[in-house]
Image: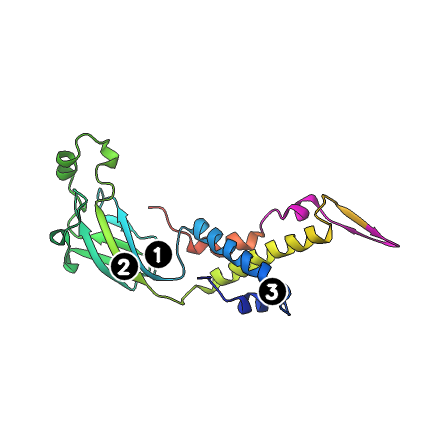
């Protein structure tokens, strides 16, 4: 599912008519993937299952704000049976930031990590020992992300149109009777990305703890 509708993208870019709808749809798919990779988040919302290290008392979920934590299980053996379910009073959820914090110290105590995985490097002994199932709101893509999405699609769209206008040749100038049109090599190649794209997305990138 795309971050925004084709109709909204065309309105933001001032594109009328349907001649380029197929191209714009392809660019939407590319922009969806680019933004998800750049921000390390899924803005479309839904239910997610993630596995995290239990070595600390904090887990940073990839997607937020969080509507609800459906299930939190902690299991050094990584079987995640019903007995490994944590009751809600054992942890706090910072919904806006997508942070889950244990109220009892590290999710997996150091002693358990050492005993159950002696053959593993110390930094991996608690990897994947915390499983969180949670939900985020759907149809709630932030306005800044929508604007960056449209700008990114528009940038790629103009690149395609420029290359088509140049006959897909590496031309930097065209002369028509008494006029000339000049293109920089960066413009022909579609580089760099508009700086506003990264500026708009900066507040929504997954933070590093």
State the image coordinates of residue 196 (x, y, percent, origin top left).
Answer: 55, 55
Secondary structure of the residue carrying numbered label 1 = loop
- In terms of sequence position, does the residue under pointer 1 or pointer 3 come before the other? 3
Q: Is residue 181 magenta?
A: yes
- Please identify the quarter of the rendering in which residue 87 is found: bottom left
Q: Earlier in the sequence, mark 3 or mark 2?
A: 3
- Determine whether, in the image, residue 177 is placed left or right of residue 71: right
Q: Residues within 10 Å of mark 3 (few under 14, many from 20)?
A: some
Q: CA distance from mark 3 to mark 2?
A: 35 Å
Magenta segment = 175-193
Q: What is the crowding at mark 1: few (fewer than 14 residues within 10 Å), some, or many (at least 20)?
A: many
The one of 166 and 91 positioned closer to us in this rendering: 166
Which of the labelled discs sits on residue 134, or is there none?
A: 2
Determine the residue positioned at 60% across, 54% down.
Answer: 156
Residue bearing the label numbered 3: 13
| Mark pair 1, 3: CA separation | 28 Å
**Residue extending farthest right:** 178
Can you give x and y, in whole percent of width and height, for residue 190 in the image? 63, 48
Q: Is residue 128 above or below residue 139?
A: above
């Amino acid at each position: 599912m795309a971050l925004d509708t084709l109709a909204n993208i065309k309105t933001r870019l001032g594109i009328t008519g349907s001649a380029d709808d197929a191209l714009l749809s392809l660019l939407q798919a590319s922009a969806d993937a680019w933004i998800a990779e750049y921000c390390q988040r899924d803005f479309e919302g839904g239910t997610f299952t993630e596995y995290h290290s239990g070595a600390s008392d904090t887990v940073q979920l990839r997607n937020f704000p969080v509507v609800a934590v459906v299930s939190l299980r902690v299991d050094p053996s990584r079987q995640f049976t019903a007995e490994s379910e944590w009751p809600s009073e054992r942890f706090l959820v910072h919904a806006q930031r997508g942070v889950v914090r244990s109220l009892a110290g590290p999710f997996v105590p150091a002693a358990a990590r050492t005993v159950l995985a002696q053959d593993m490097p110390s930094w991996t002994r608690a990897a994947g020992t915390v499983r969180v199932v949670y939900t985020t709101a759907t149809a709630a893509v932030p306005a800044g992300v929508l604007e960056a999405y449209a700008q990114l699609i528009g940038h790629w769209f103009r690149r395609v149109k420029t290359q088509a206008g140049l006959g897909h040749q590496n031309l930097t100038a065209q002369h028509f009777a008494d006029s000339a049109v000049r293109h920089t090599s960066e413009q022909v190649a579609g580089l760099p990305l508009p700086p506003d794209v990264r500026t708009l997305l900066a507040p929504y990138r997954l933070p590093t703890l």
